[in-house]
Amino acid sequence: MLLDDTALLHKEVRETEKLTYIYDTQMLVEGENLSEEQIREHLLHTLPGDCLLVVGDERLLRVHFHTNEPWAVMKYLSQFGTVYDITIENMEKQQEEFVK
């Protein structure tokens, strides 16, 4: 009985939990005089997404953002310095694997 209940729950999650923003986008930007506030405000007001985190200091920031346009995040950040340690994960695919 437990396996049937689990399968039903997974089916319900799959059918009801549609993600608005598919890509978990994370990267570092290294530069000079970086502003957490400036980058946070720009991303919040110009790119659709959620779960935004911008943390670090004037020389190194980590950016985490759920969006459908990870390339736009990289393009924006590249004007401030070197962008690296880039991770872009498709959360829909992760969700599909989880509910199997």
Image (cartoon, rainbow, N blue to C red):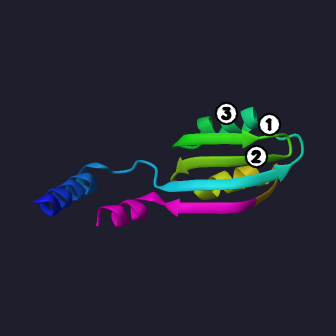
Between disc 3 and disc 2, the foreground one is 2
- In the rendered image, the quadrant that contains the C terminus is bottom left
Assign a secondary structure to mark 1: loop
Q: Residue 35 carries which label?
A: 1
Residue numbers of the magenta segment? 84-100
Three-letter residue code for mark 3: Glu
Q: Residue 69 carries which label?
A: none
Q: Earlier in the sequence, mark 3 or mark 2?
A: 3
Assign a secondary structure to mark 2: strand
Cα distance in 3D space between marks 3 and 2 = 14 Å
Residue at image coords 36%, 66%: 97
- Could you classify mark 1 by the number of other residues whose Cα lies within 10 Å: few (under 14), some (14-19), or many (20 or more)? some
Assign a secondary structure to mark 3: helix
Mark 3 sits on what residue? Answer: 41
- Could you classify mark 2 by the number of other residues whose Cα lies within 10 Å: few (under 14), some (14-19), or many (20 or more)? many
Residue 54: x percent and y percent? 68, 41
In this picture, residue 37 sits left or right of residue 100? right
In this picture, residue 67 sits left or right of residue 8? right
Q: Earlier in the sequence, mark 2 or mark 1?
A: 1
Mark 2 sits on what residue? Answer: 61
Q: Earlier in the sequence, mark 1 or mark 3?
A: 1
Between disc 2 and disc 1, the foreground one is 2
Cα distance in 3D space between marks 1 and 3 = 10 Å
Q: Is residue 88 visible?
A: yes
| Discs 3, 2 touching: Cβ within 8 Å | no
- In the rendered image, the quadrant that contains the N terminus is bottom left
